[in-house]
Image (cartoon, rainbow, N blue to C red):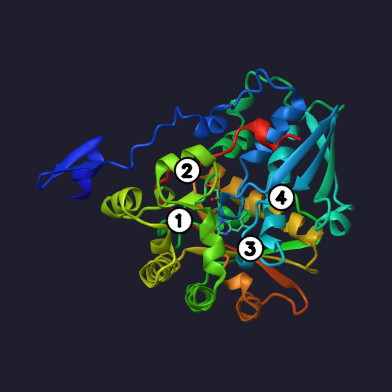
Amino acid sequence: MKALFATGGVAALGGFAVVNYNKVDYGHRGYRTWYHDEPLGYSLAEYLVLAGTLAASPHNTQPWKFSVSGSNIDLYADHRRHLGKADPLRRMMGQGLGCAIENMAVMASSLGYSLFVDDSVCNEHFYDSGLVARLQYTRITDTSNGHHQTDDLKDLPEVKAIFNRQTNRSSYTGIGKVSSHYFDAALEQKPIADVGVTWLDDRAKCQDISEVCSVTVREFLSGDATNDAMKWFRRNRAEMLSTGDGISIFQNDAPILIKHWMQLAATKEDLVNQQSKQSEIDMVDTSCDHVPMWGVIHSSTDQPKDWLSVGRVLEKCYLLSAKLGYAICPVSYPVESIAGREALRQIAEIDSGRVPQALVRVGLAPRMEKSVRRPLQSVLV
Ligand SMILES: Cc1cc2nc3c(=O)[nH]c(=O)nc-3n(C[C@H](O)[C@H](O)[C@H](O)COP(=O)(O)O)c2cc1C
């Protein structure tokens, strides 16, 4: 039956016309940013911002604002775009901002510039004005490694990764295949001060982490944070394309009939009822079982500035996965729980005193549908 639905735009089943909601109109403006892989028509600063907006963010909230002046770009947290009780300290928001910085730094260096990141303002201003970092680009004078040609930009693996990166929520295969290849490449990454990643591919430890995910998703869904998080869930394509943000069932591998029901019949109440919560639990249980490799990202302290740094490393993992052809997905339930963090710290044998900040699973899986983005104009202030 899956094959039947996969073949065309519309399929008939028992007399009902069923629209194939797997069909995506990538020509729509909600997807346009993913296709601007040449800097034509943009100033350098604008193009760096564009790369920043393609970064990962919690529930695709895109919680950023950018103020551009010459070669200076100030990055602000947009505190209207938060997950409420699902991110009470706005730690994930801070990490999303770090993801944007990393994309900008990679794009700058691909264009032959270095991006100086001053995040010393972050701890003081994160919760008031929202100013988290002052960025400044300067031309790299030693051009031996710089790529100053914009015409071959889109062929650079680093740049391709920015435009191909995605969160893949399906179940992964690849046990025994992923790790050595990935470990070597991960070790070559330029480190971010004070942030470490512990990679795990040991079968027993990987299953222990999957158990922590199972416990913490239940803990999270038993509280009232779900309602706030689900405000960023888009039930149908029209809503998703008009807001240009949020997550949806279309970026996961749910059966087409479920997507059909979501598109046509689901109400806001349905998103937070017991049945939906059970589906999320089942999804986490299934997708976190038999994961080939987990990565735990940790820092020594737990301040807004650390969240930016952790986000930079998280985005590095995304870009590396895109470059090597692997699927990746953060699983935040364990790090949003005090007991979950402690369990991760013990399983991954992370020094006491260090704080597990983000958890990712990595493996092999077919690509998913792209997420939407707001246009550049709406993030420039
Ligand atoms: C700090 C952070 C935490 C995230 N946590 C989760 C998560 O627990 N589960 C998940 O499926 N995606 C998670 N994501 C991925 C976002 O939902 C995703 O980046 C966003 O929807 C945009 O999609 P894209 O990454 O494919 O562009 C997280 C992203 C960030 C930056």
**Mark sitting earlier along the chain (4/3):** 3
Q: Would residue 296 be seen by someone viewing this image from the given angle?
A: no
Q: Would you say the residues marked 2 and 3 are in contact, meaning their CB atoms lie under 8 Å apart? A: no
Ligand 1 located in image quadrant = bottom right
> In this image, 61 relative to 266: left or right?
right
Along the polypeptide, which appears first: circle 4 or circle 1?
Answer: 4
* Image coords of residue 42 (percent x, y): 70, 22
Q: Is mark 3 within 8 Å of ligand 1?
A: no
Asked if marks 4 and 1 touch (Cβ < 8 Å), the reply is: no
Circle 2 SS class: helix
Distance from Cα at disc 4 to Cα at disc 1: 21 Å
Beta carbon at label 1 within 8 Å of ligand 1: yes
Q: Tell us which disc is closer to us: 1 or 3.
A: 3
Q: Which mark is residue 84?
A: 3
Q: Residue 358 falls in which quadrant of the image? A: bottom right
**Residue 151 relative to residue 253: left or right:** right
Above-or-below relation of 217 to 187 = below
Label 4, on which residue? 97
Asked whether, in this view, residue 86 is left or right of residue 309, the answer is left
Question: Looking at numbered disc 4 in the image, what kind of residue is underneath it?
Answer: Leu
Q: Earlier in the sequence, mark 2 or mark 4?
A: 4
Secondary structure type for disc 4: helix
| Mark nearer the N terminus (2 vs 3) | 3
Q: Identify the amino acid type marked 3.
A: Gly
Residue 302 location, x and y as percent?
78, 68
Q: Residues within 10 Å of mark 4 (few under 14, many from 20)?
A: many
